[in-house]
Each structure stands twice: as structure tokens, then as C-alpha cells.
Amino acid sequence: MSEANATNLENEVKIQNKAVHCPNCGQLMLEPGSLINEYWDSEDTVYYCWCSNCRWKGEVREVSRMTATEPAED
Ligand SMILES: [Zn+2]
């Protein structure tokens, strides 16, 4: 197996382990007919999705860093 194939396989496994659901109807994006495409934007992982159930399409973003204000420590 070449290095490129191994990388692709790792990427597929990673996507399949992500339970990305449609924000509109809640269907798992890994259902047959739905589309999920993973890419990276800066440090974030973005899943471009098309739902075969309700035909919603858009992006689900997994942020690597929260930019919200941290709660004060006691
Ligand atoms: Zn949907």
C-alpha cells in the first residue's frame, strides 16, 4: 500500500467515525445518498454536507479553539 492510499484510508475512517448530523432534520450525514466532504479552514475542521432527507446543504464546523470568554476561576 502506498503512502497516499494510507492517508486516504485514514481520512475516510476519521470521517466515518464522526457522527455528523443534519442541523435541519437530524439525519446522520453518513446515510446513503447524503454527502459529506471534509476540509480544513485555518485550525478548524469543516464538513460540507448535503442531506438526502431534507435536502439541506451547508457546513458544519468543528472548531479547534473556543474564542468565547473563559469563566472566572474560583
Ligand atoms: Zn436533513
Image: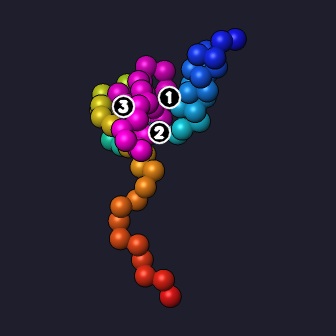
Horizontal side of 64 relative to 58 (left or right) equals right
Colour mode? rainbow
Residue assigned mark 2: 20
The kind of secondary structure element at disc 1 is loop
Circle nearer the N terminus (3, 2) = 2
Magenta stretch: give its range.
27-51
> Which residue sits at x=37%, y=25%?
52
Q: Dot 2, how many residues are within 10 Å of its Cα: few (below 14), some (14-19), or many (20+)?
A: some
Amino acid at circle 2 = Val
Amino acid at circle 1 = Leu
In magenta segment, residue 46: yes
The kind of secondary structure element at disc 3 is strand
Q: Residue 48: percent from the left, percent from the top?
A: 36, 31
| Number of numbered labels in the structure image | 3
In magenta segment, residue 28: yes
Q: Dot 3, how many residues are within 10 Å of its Cα: few (below 14), some (14-19), or many (20+)?
A: some
> Can residue 42 be seen at all in this image of the molecule?
yes
The picture quadrant where one finds residue 13 is top right
Residue assigned mark 3: 48
Residue assigned mark 1: 30
> Which residue sits at x=43%, y=82%?
72
CB under 8 Å between discs 1 and 2: yes
